[in-house]
Image (cartoon, helix red, strand yellow):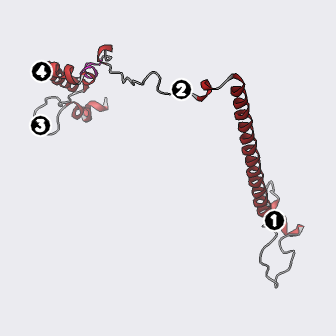
Amino acid sequence: MSWRNKRDHFTNYTCKWRKSNLGKTNPNHHYYMRLIKKETDKFLRENKDYLLANKPEIYYSMINRKLPKKYIKEEKVITPVNSYIPPQSRMSREELDQSLEKQISERKEKEQALKIKREKERKEQERLRYNRETFEKERRYIYWVDPNKPINQNKLGSSQQWRIEKKYKYY
């Protein structure tokens, strides 16, 4: 086998800067993870009481566990019981019905006005788009002309032989 003669494969398994044939030093992922785990375990052993008292979120995240319910702090908002009475509760039944109808009609008018405004904006956008497209279409007909050249140059049939693809070339 040729690879045995070349011995190139041998350099893959030995260190290039050493004279001896010892293998390369190749620490892998498990090695580093073991060192990290030792350090974190040591830190947690030394500072467990402080972390649980002051920062339990950090402690439980370091040991990859969910934060227990006793450490979860809920923000409680305390409001007085009778701090605000809505105006609807002060009204009589008829007044309440009238105010609701009035609010509904006002809302419908606002929605109608908004709908009309959007429709106008949409039509204006459509008109501008149409004008832009027609300008682009007619642009090829409007251009500067050289008065010394004939009008139909390169437009008539005999001059358009280049458009036809031939199966083979004639000489």
Report the residue that reaches farthest toward the left. 19
Nearer the N terminus, badge 2 or badge 4? 4
Q: Is residue 110 above or below residue 151?
A: above
Q: Determine which residue is flagged by label 2.
A: 85
Q: Determine which residue is flagged by label 4.
A: 46
Q: Determine which residue is flagged by label 3.
A: 18
Q: Is residue 67 above or below residue 98?
A: above
Q: Of 122 and 88, which appears nearest the observer?
A: 88
Q: Are marks 2 and 3 in contact (CB under 8 Å)?
A: no
Q: Which residues are magenta?
A: 59-64
- Main SS of the magenta part reads helix
Q: Determine which residue is flagged by label 1.
A: 138
Nearer the observer, disc 3 or disc 1? 1
- Whether residue 26 sits left or right of residue 108 in the image: it is left
Quadrant housing residue 43: top left
C-alpha gap between disc 3 and disc 1: 79 Å
Report the residue that reaches farthest toward the bottom. 148
- Whether residue 107 sits left or right of residue 1 in the image: it is right
The total number of labels drawn is 4
Element at label 3: loop
Nearer the observer, disc 2 or disc 4? 2
Which three-letter amino acid code belongs to the residue tagged 1?
Glu
